[in-house]
Image: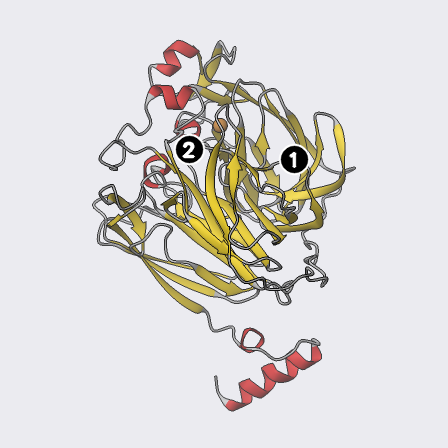
Amino acid sequence: MNRRKFIQSTVAAALAGRSISTSALANEPVTFKLMAQASLTNIVGPDFPATPVWTFGGGVPGSPIRIKRGQAIDVEVANDLDVATSVHWHGIRLPNAMDGVAGLTQVPIKPGGTFRYQFTPPDAGTFWYHSHINAHEQVGRGLYGPLIIEEESPPIVDRELVWMIDDWRLLEDASISEDFGNGHDKSHAGRIGNVPTVNGRFRDVVKVSSGERVRIRLINASNARNFSLSFGDLSPSIIAIDGQAVTPYVSNEPIVIGAAGRVDVIIDFHGEPGSHLAVVDNFYRQSFDLIKLVFEKKTLRRESLKTPIALSLPKLPEPELENSLRKEVIIGGGAMGGLQRAKLDGQWMDLREIASQGYVWALNDDVGNKLDMSPLLELKQGQSVSLSIKNDSAFPHPMHLHGHHMKLLSIDGEKLAEPIWVDSPLLMPRQEMEFAFVADNPGKWLFHCHVLEHHAAGLGAMIRVLS
Ligand SMILES: [Cu+2]
């Protein structure tokens, strides 16, 4: 930047009432390089061999990408794998060509190839990135990482932790089970593993101090596993869901995070020095310890901090409910689902015949067997949409809409006192949710279940926003 431009942007920043920081000055993108590569990492612990994984940058999770809100980003992804890949920026409202869905928004990044992703994330929050080609295998092998967009003025904490939670299906030699996309996983709950991890480690131990205030960004990178986490006698305050701020609240129930979902919490730790407690999951029948917290001998402070923990609430385009286009979407299929017939490539068939081609799920009786299919919804840019989604099946489905956030208005007919913005809401069996959003982002956007085996088996559609 030359001196004159520098002065202009300084003046502009001052006029806009902002303090002058690098982000205010810089529309220079922050550059990152991600290498998709095979690697070895010890997941289960020293008594087991290392696990061969696929990674972005050599480790699991992949290299963290962290920028301030409003900063432009330029990520060069190079592919050193033997298979094609791509990168989807989960939850980010970005230009369609940067969305990373190979086969819909870009061509796959071939082995030896590169692709540059350039965009400016408009929202602060906790997001993640992951492969979006053959995702049920590539994400299952470790191709994901955290994407953190910092607020201008985040709440004051002593420490911030990012916990990327995953669930691996490993064999006895700690290698990854190769049964990706098998029929049972597709038609039931997806690929539920046997080794749950936080940041790639099984039963990790984290040291905390009594009196310490910690923000934890929880990101569920599992193919299929949903979590329901309890923190013992600690009382986590939930401050954001799916990256978007909510009015802080303490939940009396365990914190539910569906596959692909994120929850930000702030915890004021209190405990006897030397004592420990486990963060326990109990989403499914068997509960287990996800991670262990051990209190340091030294107490940081006797009284918890009293400074505010609220983030500023999201400024997303507000849908006009009266003038909105109404659409009902029914999730059907799977084992014990009751779906008899559906359309594959526009042809009605028995579910048995559809299953013989590897598909078992449908949205509004349409099997999502390809990405660039005829759209579930075709919308004009700026159109408000009221979307009702009903899970008419026997399994939970975290439904992800690309390129937009949806305002969750009601659950099973009961209005939320305070609607929240989501991009990957978890619908329990037979549950119905109502959403609204403004289709303000032109392009072809996927709307699919983030149980990646369900998506591979037809639980997906495309929503087109015309410019
Ligand atoms: Cu699903």
- Cα distance, mark 2 to mark 1? 27 Å
Is any part of residue 385 visible from this angle? no
Q: Ligand 1 closer than 8 Å to the CB at disc 2?
A: no
Nearer to me, 49 or 389: 49
Badge 2: residue crowd in 10 Å (few <14, some 14–19, many ≥20): many
> How many numbered marks appear?
2
Residue type (three-letter) at the residue carrying disc 2: Leu
Q: Which residue is mark 1?
A: 253
Q: In the rendered view, would you say 379 is above or below 394?
A: below
Above or below, 440 relative to 379 = below
Please tell me in which quadrant of the rendered image residue 70 appears.
bottom right
Q: Position of residue 134 (x, y in %)?
A: 33, 37
Q: Nearer the viewer, residue 140 or 413?
A: 140
- Badge 1 crowding class, 10 Å Cα cut-off, few under 14, some 14 to 19, many 20 or more, is few
Disc 2 and disc 1 in contact, CB within 8 angstroms: no
Q: Residue at x 71, y 46 (%)?
A: 249
Q: Can residue 442 be seen at all in this image of the molecule?
A: yes
Q: Which residue is mark 2?
A: 452
* Mark toward the viewer: 2 or 1: 1
Q: Secondary structure at mark 2?
A: helix
In the image, 409: left or right of 110?
Answer: right
Residue at position x 55%, y 58% in the image: 209
- Residue 463 shown left or right of residue 328 in the figure: left
Q: Earlier in the sequence, mark 2 or mark 1?
A: 1
